Image (cartoon, coloured by chain):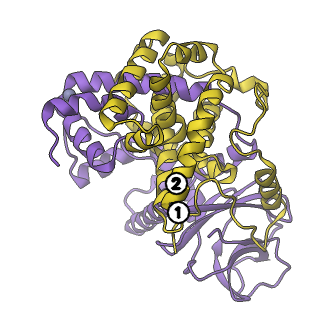
Chain colours: A purple, B yellow
Amino acid sequence: MKQDHSDLHTLAAAYALNALDPAERQAFGDHLPQCQACREEVAEFEATAARLADAAAQNPPPMMKQHVMAAVDGVRQLPPRVPGTTQPAGAGRALRRRAVPLALAASVVAAASFAGLAAWQNRQSEQFQERALQAERRLDDVSAVLAAPDARTAHGRAGNGALTTVVASERQNRAVFTAAGLPAPAAGMTYQLWLDHDGTMSPAGFIHRDGTVLLDGNTADAGAVGLTLEPAGGSPRPTTAPLLLMALPT
Amino acid sequence: MDTPPPAGRPRPPIPLVTAVTAAAAVTAAHAPAAGARPVNQPLPFGPGRTGRASHAGRSDLAEVMAEVAHGDKQAFSLLYDALAPLVFGIVIRVVRDRSQSEEVAQEVMIDLWRQAARYRSDAGSVTAWAATIAHRRAVDRVRSAQASADREQAQAAREHQTAFDEVSEQVETRLESEQVRRCMRGLTELQRQAVSLAYYRGLTYREVAEALRTPLPTIKTRMRDGLIRLRDCMGVTT
Ligand SMILES: [Zn+2]
């Protein structure tokens, strides 16, 4: 059913309250860029709705902050949207590099865990650029899992006190693992992650410090995530008692 | 397969739970159903709620936001403290199930970090921006649960009726802001119910019309008039 124009102007309130059906929401969203009056009205109604939200404020569990702060290490920030233009892919990339170099560098260290910020100085190195691109792809993967509509979250606490979070997307067949308060491993040891497939543990990568990593391997058919301390370089099978074995969220 | 559990129902316990997960499950199980909370019971953790983002220096938060947009995690920590109660509060109002609400609120906070550079101060306050994102996510969660196969029409209707019954007294008694309570009382019954069911329960205006057994055009008008009246009563400017 086609909305006529005068009808659309009256939808700002329902839009700001998220009360429109998907089709109407779409139609009104298409209308907004062309209608200054509706844009102003939406802004006022959203500010009004924010007062309603504020009136309902209550403190979240304190643990949530640790999880969020640890998780954002692995989440790349989106570039600013340039109003009125559609960005060509290349330009978006350049913009993003300029906008968040520090965050990106920090995230790369956390998420892709190759050593040495110094490497960032070496802009000529093709090998480095390749690794940086790989790291970026991993960050995109982490962000994609966290933003997945079917993302499910579970929290745990490892035997060494670290707070852990697993976010899994069944549709993407991937999961990310976040740790906060992870003690530094003893010299020569490293934290290794595992996926439990019916009692068989398969290596799922490493986490070297607080932050977020994408688990290696298919997670859709895995039952749980494990964490052990292993000799540096990792092991094909766990050689120490698990610090953590937590069910993948379903 | 990947359909989330229906809103409002705690997830089944996980066999391999760790201490924290178990504690969270207990909390969720013992949390009173929305509406069962005694009238005027103070919400936990008094301070923090009073550091209300919308009243405390909009320009301050906008400055913090600019730093967050450049990847500053300390600034994000400030932003978190300012906005997390509002985000969690509105999410749990709409989603109702506590553990799901924690998930959604967490996703929202991460999303604020992701989208920081897309915030534009000329389009509204940081608080309004965050509230919009949070409410949208909460509504998405509730509606995807509603769309899942195990949710029957009758059940939905029953919930609407419950929502309808609960909303009036809840809106009056469980809101923290005296101004919002006062302005809500300034609405007609139908205006108030239309706004409340849409915003605090995440119903579409079609669902509001069904729940209130009122024709759709009437609901459209009342929702709009109600919001206009609230806007004017609160002296909202952008
Ligand atoms: Zn218009």
The alpha-carbon separation of the residues under discs 2 and 1 comes to 7 Å
Chain of the residue where label 2 is placed in the rendered structure: B
Res B66 visible: no
Task: Return the residue at label 2.
Answer: B156
Q: Is residue A221 above or below residue A23?
A: below
Q: Earlier in the sequence, mark 2 or mark 1?
A: 1
Chain of the residue where label 1 is placed in the rendered structure: B
Kindly state the secondary structure of the residue where label 1 is placed. Answer: loop
**Residue B155: quarter of image:** bottom right
Task: Return the residue at label 1.
Answer: B151
Q: Residue at x 25, y 38 (%)?
A: A28
Mark 2 residue crowding within 10 angstroms, few (<14) / some (14–19) / many (20+): some
Q: Nearer the viewer, residue B224 or B232?
A: B224
Q: Position of residue A16 (x, y in %)?
A: 38, 32
Q: Position of residue A48 (x, y in %)?
A: 45, 22
Q: Are marks 2 and 1 in contact (CB under 8 Å)?
A: yes
- Ligand 1 image position (quadrant): top left
| Tag 2: amino acid | Ala
| Tag 1: amino acid | Arg
Q: Residue at x 38, y 48 (%)?
A: A97
